[in-house]
Image (spheres, rainbow, N blue to C red):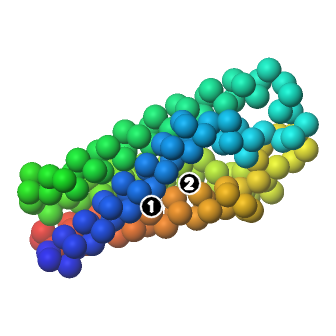
Amino acid sequence: MQLWSGAFTVVLALNVAWFSMGFWYFTVKSVAAAILLVPKSARGSPLFDTMSASVRFLGAMNFAFALLSALVLANLSLFGDPRQRALLAGVFAAAHAGQFLCNVPIAIGGGRRGESLWDVLSGPMLFIFAVDFTLMLANAVVAAGLLTSAL
């Protein structure tokens, strides 16, 4: 249990950092996020402002997960049972999985094609893609380890 408890604490801290960065980037820097997603030729369109405003929703979701991660980290004693911690790690794994898996079809399809989609396999999107994958796995492994330690 001790090993997995420590791993849970580390993963929570990583979740706080990553989800907080997602909040900042997609909410505070929403125009930069939209530039990443929209091809240069389409940035003069009125829909660019719509995209910029829409990604704030993703930032707000990241804020909620950052806050939950921080609150759990600050109140670990409320979640002393490894099954409780496993449940939380599973939820965080699902949050990262959702952000990773939505980009898989775009990555498989070759990324940006003309005026549509975005390039997942280069630049900042590759970094986001890789970190969400890594944190999805880390949270899932910790959840499995905690459940195994509870048996």
Amino acid under disc 2? Phe
The residue beneath circle 2 is 100
In this orientation, does residue 109 appear? no
- Residue at the image point whose x is 73% and y is 46% from the top: 36
Q: Quadrant of residue 6?
A: bottom left
- Left or right: residue 64 versus residue 49 is left
Q: CA distance from mark 2 to mark 1?
A: 8 Å
Whole-percent x, y for residue 71 in the image: 23, 47
- Residue at the image point whose x is 66% and y is 42% from the top: 33
The residue beneath circle 1 is 136
- Residue at the image point whose x is 76% and y is 53% from the top: 119
Whole-percent x, y for residue 19 in the image: 44, 50
- Left or right: residue 89 versus residue 37 is left
Quadrant (top left/top right/bottom left/bottom right) for the N terminus: bottom left
Residue furthest bottom as drawn: 3
Tag 2: Cα neighbours inside 10 Å, few (<14), some, or many (≥20)? Answer: some
Amino acid under disc 1? Met
- Left or right: residue 105 versus residue 101 is right
| SS assignment at label 1 | helix
- Residue at the image point whose x is 8% and y is 57% from the top: 77
